Image (cartoon, rainbow, N blue to C red):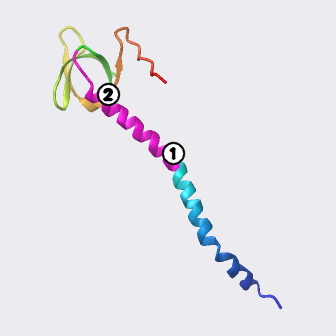
Amino acid sequence: MLLYGQEAGGAAQGGGFSMLIMMAIIFAIFFFLIIRPQRKKQKDHQTLVQSLKGGERVITSGGIFGTVDRVLEDRVDLKVDKNTRMQVLKTSISTVVDQSGQQPQKKQ
C-alpha cells in the first residue's frame, strides 16, 4: 500500500535549493533591469549638476528655460528674461541645452 504523503516528502528536500536559485535569478533580473539603470541615471544627473557654469542654457524640472547667470553652492541664478532672474536649486536642473534650444545628442 502506497502513502501519498511519503512521495511529497521526498520531493520537498530538493525544493529549498531550487527556491534559492530562483530567488537569485529574480534578484539578478531586478538588478540589471531596474537598479543599475537608475543608478547610472542618478550618477549622470549628479555629474551634470556639478559641471554647471555660467552662460549655459538649461531646462528646470518644472519646464522653465533659462540661462545660468551665477552658480552658488546649492543653487543657481537663472536669467529667464531681460529683467527677470530666478534662484533654483541645482538639483532642479534637468537638462542642459545648446544655444539653438535643442537638447544635445548623447554620444553612444
Q: Is residue 17 above or below residue 35?
A: below
**Disc 2 or 1, which lies upstream in sequence?**
1
Of 58 and 104, nearer the camera is: 104
Amino acid found under the numbered disc labelled 2: Leu
Q: What kind of element bears circle 1?
A: helix
Q: Position of residue 61 (x, y in %)?
A: 34, 28
Q: Are marks 2 and 1 in contact (CB under 8 Å)?
A: no
**Is residue 80 toward the left or the right of residue 38 in the image?**
left
Which circle marks residue 48 in the picture?
2
**Is residue 6 toward the left or the right of residue 72 in the image?**
right
Which circle marks residue 32 in the picture?
1
Image point 37% across, 12% down: which residue?
101
**Is residue 28 toward the left or the right of residue 94 in the image?**
right
Q: Tell which residue pokes out farthest to the bottom in this image.
A: 1
Q: Tell which residue pokes out farthest to the front in this image.
A: 108
- Does the stretch in magenta take in 53? yes
- The quadrant holding residue 48 is top left
Which circle marks residue 61 in the picture?
none
- Does the stretch in magenta take in 17? no
Q: Give the range drawn in magenta.
A: 30-54
| Label 1 Cα crowd, 10 Å radius (few <14 / some 14-19 / many 20+) | few
Tell me the distance, in whole angstroms, between the alpha carbons under discs 2 and 1: 23 Å
Q: Is residue 65 above or below residue 28?
A: above
Looking at the figure, which quarter contains the N terminus?
Answer: bottom right
Amino acid found under the numbered disc labelled 1: Phe
